[in-house]
Amino acid sequence: MQLTINGEIYTDLNAGINVLGLLSHLNLPKAKIAVERNRVIVPKSGYGTVVLKDGDVLEIITFIGGG
């Protein structure tokens, strides 16, 4: 399965992976992250149920505090 994540193409993902599985695969915490799939924000409550499909385009944004 091929996904585009933050402009990079990933082909090493299993079909049927959900957002939570993707975050785990990428070693990203689910806290302080926003995920956009095909220009639509995925709610955190959907991370375990939203199944990604071949060709999906994702943007993953990590929030960083500072001042």
Image (cartoon, rainbow, N blue to C red):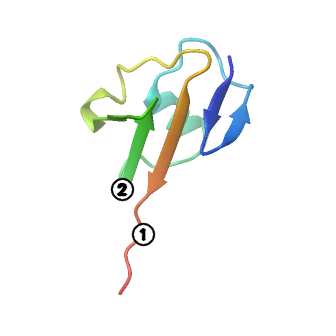
Q: What mark, if any, has residue 24 been given in the picture?
A: none
- Residue at the bottom extreme, as displayed: 67
Which three-letter amino acid code belongs to the residue tagged 1?
Answer: Ile
The residue at the far top in this view is 16
x 53%, y 12%: residue: 16
* Figure quadrant of the N terminus: top right
Mark 1, other Cα within 10 Å: few <14 / some 14–19 / many ≥20: few
Spot occupied by residue 6 in the image (x, y as percentages of width and height): 60, 45
Figure check: 1 above or below 48: above
Given residues 57 and 47, the one toward you in this image is 57
Where does label 2 land, which residue? 32
Q: Which quadrant of the structure image shows residue 64?
A: bottom left
Q: Quadrant of the C terminus?
A: bottom left
Identify the amino acid type marked 2.
Lys
Distance in Å between CA atoms under marks 2 and 1: 8 Å
Whether pointer 2 and pointer 1 mark residues with C-beta atoms closer than 8 Å, the reply is no
In percent of the image, x 29 and y 37: which residue is there?
Answer: 44
Q: Is residue 20 left or right of residue 13?
A: left
Expressed as whole percent of the image width and height from the top left, the position of residue 29 reads: 45, 49
Q: Position of residue 7 (x, y in %)?
A: 65, 43
Q: Position of residue 41 (x, y in %)?
A: 34, 37
Residue that label 1 marks? 64
Q: Residue at x 61, y 20 (%)?
A: 55
Q: Quadrant of residue 56?
A: top right
Describe residue 48's horizontal placement relative to residue 51 as left or right. left
Q: Is residue 33 above or below residue 20?
A: below
Mark 2 burial class by Cα count in 10 Å: few <14, some 14-19, many 20+: few
